[in-house]
Image: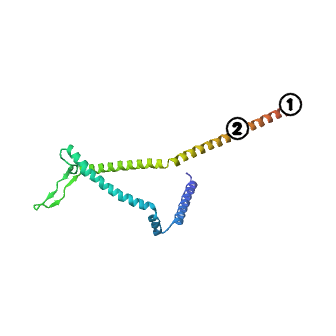
Amino acid sequence: MANAEKKALKEQKKAEKKAMKAHLKAQKTGFWSDFKKFITKGNVLDLAVAVVIGSAFNAITNGLVKFIINPCITLFTGDISLEELKTVLREAVVDDAGAVTSPEVAILWGEWIQTIIQFLIIAFSIFVFVRVFKKMSDKLHYKEIEEKKVADAKKKEEDDAKAAAAAAVAAEKEAQLQAFYKNVEKQTELLEKLANK
């Protein structure tokens, strides 16, 4: 790359940065006015409701895993509950009085498996909810969706008709141009014959 090209590229980047800064400065508003706009939007209230419902659903899921799924798993693991399933890396150190001086260090496999089960239940529940909601929404908006499909098909037909008409006009102009060229050739031949006589 030549030095002139590098310099031009550098100048272009500077101009782009300058334009971006000017654009951002023009759109700049105060912190509190932005915060007020954010808070007064309906989406914030929807988000707050979702957080509350999500917390409640999380408690339900925890209860399902702890009080229903874990006891069933305990039956298959030989009376070892998931909460007790762990690999001890270092035993807890207890003094003569029975107080723990150094806590146990362990990999809590059972807690991790519980968390995975809770995640899968929540993910599956959200999937089912979104799927049902989408189907209901499609049923409610069926008429609009069908009208949009019909409008799209009509627009495509119109576009195809316009394209066909344009192609026909272009073909007619080409035919006229070819006829004109043939006519010019005939006249040229006649003029050459007359000139040769």
Quarter the C terminus occupies: top right
Q: Using the numbered discs, state the Cα–Cα distance from disc 2 to disc 1 in whole angstroms.
A: 33 Å
**Identity of the amino acid at label 2?**
Ala
User: Measured along the vertical axis of the image, is residue 25 above or below residue 130?
Assistant: below
Viewer-side residue, 35 vs 42: 42
- Locate residue 38 relative to residue 176 in the image: left or right: left
**Identity of the amino acid at label 1?**
Lys
Whole-percent x, y for residue 176 in the image: 75, 38
User: Measured along the vertical axis of the image, is residue 48 above or below residue 113?
Assistant: below
What residue is shown with label 2? 171
Answer with the quarter of the image where residue 150 lies.
top right
Q: Residue furthest right?
A: 197
Please state which of the two labelled residues, at mark 2 or mark 1, is closer to the viewer: 2
- Locate residue 60 relative to residue 96 in the image: left or right: right
Viewer-side residue, 101 vs 155: 155
Helix, strand or loop at label 1? It is: helix
Whole-percent x, y for residue 55 in the image: 33, 57
Q: Which comes before the other along the chain, label 2 or label 1?
A: 2
What residue is shown with label 1? 193
Helix, strand or loop at label 2? It is: helix
- Locate residue 79 relative to residue 171 in the image: left or right: left
Whole-percent x, y for residue 121 in the image: 32, 49
At label 1, counting other C-alpha atoms closer than 10 Å, the crowd grade (few under 14, some 14-19, many 20 or more) is few
At label 2, counting other C-alpha atoms closer than 10 Å, the crowd grade (few under 14, some 14-19, many 20 or more) is few
Whole-percent x, y for residue 98 in the image: 12, 60
Q: Residue at the location (52% across, 66% down)?
A: 25
- Locate residue 61 relative to residue 78 in the image: left or right: right
Q: Residue at the location (16% across, 61% down)?
A: 101
Q: Residue at the location (44% across, 48% down)?
A: 136
Viewer-side residue, 90 vs 18: 90
Viewer-side residue, 124 vs 28: 124
